[in-house]
């Protein structure tokens, strides 16, 4: 007997402990460790945590292993470096105002990743905060700036080309900028992404296109930039590249 407690006392106390305390008890001394190895004590803990597992346990049930495996706090999973890079991508962006083409440009992924080089004065604080946020990844300046009268429908299409595989994907297909965030001076359009059949359980993730603008008068805006984001599921450079890699490239 070590530490002045008999085996019988320890065997009476251990079933009342939670798993964390029993783990600590195993560190006290050899006597406590040997007694705490008894799977009966871990069965008592599992019976409180997952009562159904004890009603019809698997034939090979090891309750200590069960508790230690599934009670650990989850550690953050870090994505590996994607094979796809922004240098592999070209985005073809076209916009129409009531059917008339007002913007048409092929933009490399590196240009979009480079962001806005010159932010105009007078934009709202809400937009400033958004543009400086770490998840604001893909943006470009619109030159010359577009002066648009609000009211007529503005639509956008975005195709993407992979230089590494020579394939194309549709990111946005004639979506309308039907939401105007006046406080943030942004007009937004979105499209649900189409993923490769290799990923059948991925769905309901949108690509968002934003027009960044200044008010120039009643119902008139001046678009100085555009932003492409995938904030439903991807908020970092690595996440965006993995998401784009899973698209239905043809």
Image (tube, grey):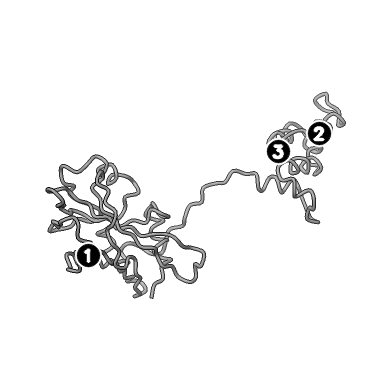
Task: Give how far across and how far down residue 13 sits, in percent.
Answer: 80, 31
Label pair 1/2, CB-CB below 8 angstroms: no
Mark 3 and mark 2 lie on one chain; the one further toward the N terminus is 3
Task: Give how far across and how far down residue 230 sits, in percent.
Answer: 37, 56
Q: CA distance from mark 3 to mark 2?
A: 18 Å
Query: Can you tell which quarter of the image residue 107 is in?
Result: bottom left
The label on residue 19 is 3
Please report the residue visible at 17 percent of the width from the left and 68 percent of the height from the top. 100
Q: Mark 1 Cα within 10 Å, few/some/many (few <14, many 20+)? A: many
Q: CA distance from mark 3 to mark 1?
A: 60 Å
Q: Which residue is mark 1?
A: 95
Mark 3 and mark 1 lie on one chain; the one further toward the N terminus is 3
Kindly report which numbered mark, 3 or 2, lies closer to the viewer in this rendering: 3
Please report the residue visible at 80 percent of the width from the left and 25 percent of the height from the top. 3
Please report the residue visible at 27 percent of the width from the left and 55 percent of the height from the top. 210
Q: Residue furthest top?
A: 4
Q: Which residue is mark 2?
A: 31
Q: Mark 2 Cα within 10 Å, few/some/many (few <14, many 20+)? A: some
Q: Quadrant of the C terminus?
A: bottom left
Q: Quadrant of the N terminus?
A: top right
């Amino acid at each position: 007997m070590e530490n002045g407690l008999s085996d019988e006392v320890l065997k009476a106390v251990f079933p009342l402990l939670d798993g964390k305390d029993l783990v600590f008890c195993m560190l006290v001394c050899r006597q406590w460790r040997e007694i705490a190895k008894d799977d009966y004590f871990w069965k008592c803990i599992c019976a409180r945590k997952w009562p159904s597992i004890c009603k019809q346990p698997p034939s090979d049930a090891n309750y200590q292993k069960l508790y230690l495996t599934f009670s650990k706090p989850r550690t953050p999973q870090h994505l590996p470096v994607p094979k796809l890079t922004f240098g592999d991508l070209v985005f073809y962006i076209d916009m129409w105002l009531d059917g008339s083409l007002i913007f048409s440009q092929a933009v490399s992924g590196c240009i979009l990743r480079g962001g806005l080089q010159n932010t105009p004065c007078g934009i709202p604080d809400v937009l400033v905060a958004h543009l400086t946020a770490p998840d604001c990844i893909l943006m470009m300046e619109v030159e010359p700036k577009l002066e648009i009268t609000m009211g007529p429908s503005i639509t956008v299409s975005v195709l993407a080309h992979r230089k590494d595989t020579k394939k194309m994907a549709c990111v946005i297909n004639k979506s309308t900028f039907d939401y105007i965030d006046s406080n943030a001076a942004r007009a937004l359009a979105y499209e649900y992404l189409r993923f490769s059949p290799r990923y059948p359980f991925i769905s309901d993730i949108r690509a968002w296109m934003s027009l960044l603008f200044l008010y120039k008068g009643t119902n008139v805006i001046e678009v100085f930039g555009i932003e492409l984001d995938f904030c439903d599921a991807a908020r970092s450079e690595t996440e965006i590249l993995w998401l784009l890699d899973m698209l239905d490239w043809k």
